Image (cartoon, helix red, strand yellow):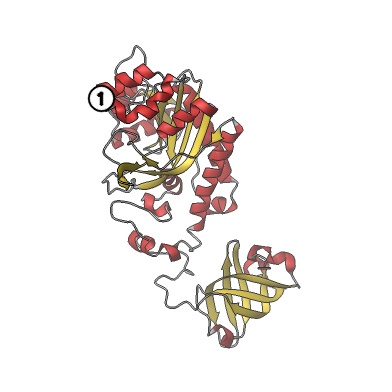
Amino acid sequence: MQRILSAQLPAYTGETVTVAGWIHRRRILKSVAFLILRDRSGFAQIVTPPEILEEFSEETVVSVTGTVTANPVAPGGVEITQPTIERLSDPVGQLPIELFRPSLGVNLPTLLDHAALTLRHPSRRPVFELGAALVRGFRETLDGIGFTEVHSPKIVGVSTESGANVFGLDYYGRKAYLAQSPQLYKQTLVGVFERVYEIGHAYRAEPSDTARHLSEYVSLDAELGFIESQRDVMKVLRDVFAGMLAAAAEVPSVAAAGFALPVVPEEIPIVHFSEALKIAGAAPDEPDLAPADERAVCEWALREHGSEFVFVEGYPTLHRAFYTHPEPGREPYSRAFDLLFRGLELVSGSQRLHRYADYVETLTERGYAIEAYADFLEVFKLGMPPHGGFAIGLERLLAMLVGATNVREVTFFPRDLHRVTP
């Protein structure tokens, strides 16, 4: 279609052009009518006789050909006059929600039930443009330091984390699962490319009906070889976040929305798990940080270091995934870490085991069937370097950056304990 976007109209003053989009709003007065057209770049005002608009309704898709005329009170300082309007879609009937109002003003179930419509509201677009920018920054940062993008299967024969929170499926008469993460595959591919990342969906059958959990989410994973410890992984993660937020800051709609994007310090403060328990006033034998503990540690980092980010490293090995490397000579601690941000755990990562015998010992101690991991373990008979990685949940990060109270608010079509439509 030969059209220009509404944002381009000022450059065509005095010319005849064609624009196309959705009828955002109609204002029909006694002697004149205004049609506000919405496209991906913004809004255009079209001036027309009242009787013409009576046959059109909001959200109908139209093309408009007319003359671009200066008008300082119109969007962009111009409007289209003497228009010819052509309907490009079926007529749209009564809408459940009026999109021309400044805010949607609906509850979460209504927002999600009518996602095909509510996603069109101007307030929603910057949220998802922010998400797209974060993904772009993730990819560009890792591309720039020698990582290779990979794509792993989402139908797997064994549950990655050896837990029960997996979606089982019938795979041609055999048992299979939706992948909880690309973990085993990205470790394998370190043996090929040394540094890999993946942007893909992950699936968790957690019966958690909370504002933080989804059954399907976008996971940003990275894995790198030839490391000395988890600190090398943490350094890459710090740079990745800086790149993601820099990409986000370059998007005009994100800047205009006024999201509270944080500053990533050159060095994110690091605290050992045992010390984090002391900061939070928790019992020294706790196996993990409770939500209140995470908030306390974040408050400490902001107060003592002026940072909204803080690393906690050294979580107990037995409470981390089987592939987590223990801290040599410092049992029961591991080389696992979490990145906390604004009171919540945002990213998990670790140095991984990389020797075959260590995997056999760990899986046996935890009561897992070695046979189920035979294909994966074969990799570690073939020479694997010390390596580690991390995973970022895109929706959780996005919710925290825009101040959403529920992760479903920043998910196009969320899947959770109750929702599998639309």
When asked about the image quadrant of residue 294, the answer is top left
- On the image, the x and y values in percent for residue 282 come to 26, 27
For the residue pair 351 and 37, the one nearer the viewer reads as 351
Q: Quadrant of the C terminus?
A: bottom left
Q: Could you tell me which residue is drawn at 36 percent across and 51 percent down?
A: 406
Amino acid type of the residue tagged 1 in the rendering: Arg
Q: Secondary structure at mark 1?
A: loop
Horizontal relation, residue 203 to residue 386: left or right: left
Q: Residue most toward the right?
A: 14
Q: Could you tell me which residue is drawn at 28 percent across and 55 percent down?
A: 418
The relative height of residue 330 versus residue 212 in the rendered view (above or below) is: above
Q: Residues within 10 Å of mark 1 (few under 14, many from 20)?
A: few
Q: Residue most toward the top?
A: 329
- On the image, the x and y values in percent for residue 374 come to 35, 27
Horizontal relation, residue 50 to residue 268: left or right: right
The residue to which callout 1 is attached is 366
Q: Could you tell me which residue is drawn at 35 percent across and 59 percent down?
A: 421
Q: Quadrant of the N terminus?
A: bottom right
Q: Could you tell me which residue is drawn at 65 percent across and 80 percent down?
A: 84
The relative height of residue 393 versus residue 129 in the rendered view (above or below) is: above
Residue 402 seen in the current view: yes
- On the image, the x and y values in percent for residue 212 come to 34, 45
For the residue pair 84 and 25, the one nearer the viewer reads as 84
- On the image, the x and y values in percent for residue 219 come to 43, 41
The relative height of residue 191 versus residue 67 in the rendered view (above or below) is: above
When asked about the image quadrant of residue 276, the answer is top left
